[in-house]
Image: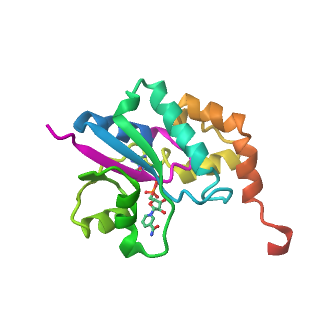
Amino acid sequence: MKKSRGIIVGRFQPVHNGHIQIIRNVLEEIDELIIAIGSAQLSHTPKNPFTAGERVTMVKEALNEININPNSYYIIPIPDISNHSLWASHVKTLTPSFNKVYSGNPLVQRLFIENNYEVTTPPLYNRTEYSGREIRNKMINDEKWDILVPNTTYKFIREIDGINRIKDLSQKEINEL
Ligand code: NAD
């Protein structure tokens, strides 16, 4: 029988427990999941501090941590393009074929619906805290964020000095003041 394959697109800046919960749930419904790392060309900005390679590592380690079968998913970086109406086709050219899209992002949903894909909105888990922006803000303000991300993500961000990277990126340049 043909395998069912879905896709979830995220920036994963950084990976958090909400992302991992959706991935785990979706993998109970389908055979294979494409985890697309969006805005792959971006790094070292306040909103997108981590490189695509760092985000691939975070996702992979987090899924290993909960014993997800590595043959059940692909992790594929996808750079942004300037033309939204071509984006779903752009994603399609960079990934194995898929027939289901999982996203809570209204723009992502719209672009795939217009390309005749079946789109499902996964439930949000503790969105006030499991949010990349909230976690980055907590890092800047020296608040507790370790419980909001997988253990491996916490260790990885510390290893690459990610907290200081985010703090440095949040400072305005002297000529911007
Ligand atoms: P994200 O990391 O914020 O979220 C990824 C997914 O996880 C989303 O579906 C979101 O709804 C879900 N999620 C987040 N927190 C959750 C929680 N607490 N509980 C449950 N689910 C949760 O990433 P995003 O911003 O949705 O990523 C979209 C990517 O697609 C971006 O990189 C964007 O640039 C890209 N994109 C590019 C174009 C283009 O290049 N023209 C067009 C559209 C989208």
Left or right, residue 27 beside residue 15 = left
Q: Is residue 16 magenta?
A: yes
Residue at (50, 41) in percent of width and height: 16
Q: Is residue 112 magenta?
A: no
Q: Position of residue 40 (x, y in %)?
A: 54, 56
Q: Position of residue 1 (x, y in %)?
A: 13, 37
Left or right, residue 31 beside residue 38 = left
Residue 177 appears in the rendering: no
Q: Position of residue 81 (x, y in %)?
A: 48, 70
State how many labels appear.
0
Q: Position of residue 98 (x, y in %)?
A: 27, 51
Residue at (21, 40) in percent of width and height: 3
Query: In the image shown, does 104 or 142 lie closer to the viewer?
Result: 104
Query: In the image shown, does 24 or 148 lie closer to the viewer?
Result: 24
Residue at (31, 62) in percent of width and height: 109
Query: In which quadrant of this rendering is ligand 1 seen?
Result: bottom left
Q: Is residue 62 above or below residue 83?
A: above
Q: Is residue 16 above or below residue 115?
A: above
The residues colored magenta run 1-17
Residue at (78, 65) in percent of width and height: 172
Left or right, residue 102 beside residue 129 = left
- For the C terminus, give its image quadrant: bottom right
Residue 109 appears in the rendering: yes
